[in-house]
Image (cartoon, rainbow, N blue to C red):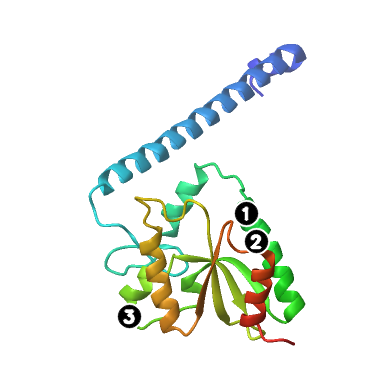
């Protein structure tokens, strides 16, 4: 055993100090490497986003994964890298007026026929299909506020909640609604609107009685 090491063993306090300094140096090096990797990831995404400006948008598959131009498949690795450096937090699925309408609508449907269900914020791409890929892409990510689903898990009616600012000047809501209405009409799915401040509880109940068959 080297004499230097024997000398340190004879002096345990010095040995402990040496080991502590070594551990601190190791931690500092590890943090430095991790910081460099984090900076490289951020620089990569900054350059990637800058390079994509003015280019065609990335196409999305039905499952939401990005698809490279040319059909090379989803780039889940890039998505994971982006998610790892981002922050996330939860938020309510519905705002307060929508939540109140959902509770009233759900109670009315259950009272009418408990085998039917009310679904909220459903993407059209989840219950519509089309052999025309471009037409399907036009409605895939659009949503209906509420969907009435029969016992066979098929959406039969869509209900849209029109808030006070839905049709304000400059809003594109009317154009989006027209796209959804036409797709739903062609699929044989009913489209109905509930207008804020105009639809009473009694009118909502009568609407449900009209749309949902009794048990």
**Mark 2 vs mark 3: which is more N-terminal?**
2
Q: Quadrant of residue 43?
A: top left
* Real-space Cα separation, disc 2 to disc 3, in angstroms: 34 Å
Describe residue 68's horizontal placement relative to residue 160 as left or right.
Answer: left
Nearer the camera: disc 2 or disc 3: 2
Q: Position of residue 52 (x, y in %)?
A: 27, 49
Q: Residue at x 42, y 66 (%)?
A: 177
Q: Is 141 located above or below residue 15 in the figure? A: below
Describe residue 110's horizontal placement relative to residue 60 as left or right.
Answer: right
Q: Quadrant of residue 65?
A: bottom left
Which one is in front, 8 or 168? 168
Asked if marks 2 and 1 touch (Cβ < 8 Å), the reply is yes
Q: Position of residue 8 (x, y in %)?
A: 70, 15
Q: Which mark is residue 97?
A: 1
Q: Secondary structure at mark 2?
A: helix
* Real-space Cα separation, disc 2 to disc 1, in angstroms: 6 Å
* Real-space Cα separation, disc 1 to disc 3, in angstroms: 36 Å
Asked whether residue 114 is in view, the answer is: no
Q: Position of residue 19 (x, y in %)?
A: 67, 21
**Mark 1 vs mark 3: which is more N-terminal?**
1
Give the quadrant of the C terminus. Answer: bottom right
Q: Is 92 located above or below residue 35 in the figure? A: below
Q: Which residue is labeled 2 in the image?
A: 101
Which one is in front, 136 or 210? 210
Q: Which residue is labeled 3 in the image?
A: 132
Name the residue furthest left: 54
Describe residue 149's horizontal placement relative to residue 66 as left or right.
Answer: right
Q: Residues within 10 Å of mark 3 (few under 14, many from 20)?
A: few
Asked if marks 2 and 3 touch (Cβ < 8 Å), the reply is no
């Amino acid at each position: 055993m080297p004499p230097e090491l024997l000398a340190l063993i004879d002096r345990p306090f010095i040995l402990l100090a040496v080991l502590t300094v070594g551990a601190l140096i190791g931690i500092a090096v590890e943090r430095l490497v991790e910081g460099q990797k984090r900076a490289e990831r951020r620089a990569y995404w900054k350059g990637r986003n800058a390079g994509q400006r003015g280019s065609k948008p990335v196409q999305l598959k039905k499952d939401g994964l990005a698809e490279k131009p040319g059909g090379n498949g989803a780039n889940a690795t890039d998505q994971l890298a982006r998610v790892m450096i981002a922050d996330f937090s939860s938020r309510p699925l519905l705002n307060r007026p929508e939540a109140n309408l959902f509770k009233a609508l759900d109670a009315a449907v259950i009272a009418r026929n408990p085998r039917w269900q009310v679904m909220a914020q459903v993407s059209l791409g989840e219950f519509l299909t089309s052999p025309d890929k471009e037409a399907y892409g036009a409605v895939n990510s659009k949503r209906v506020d509420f969907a009435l689903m029969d016992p066979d898990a098929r959406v039969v009616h869509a209900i849209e909640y029109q808030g006070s600012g839905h049709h304000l000047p400059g809003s594109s809501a009317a154009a989006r609604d027209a796209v959804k209405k036409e797709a739903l009409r062609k699929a044989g799915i009913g489209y109905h609107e509930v207008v804020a401040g105009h639809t009473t509880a009694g009118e909502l109940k009568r609407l449900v009685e009209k749309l949902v068959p009794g048990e």
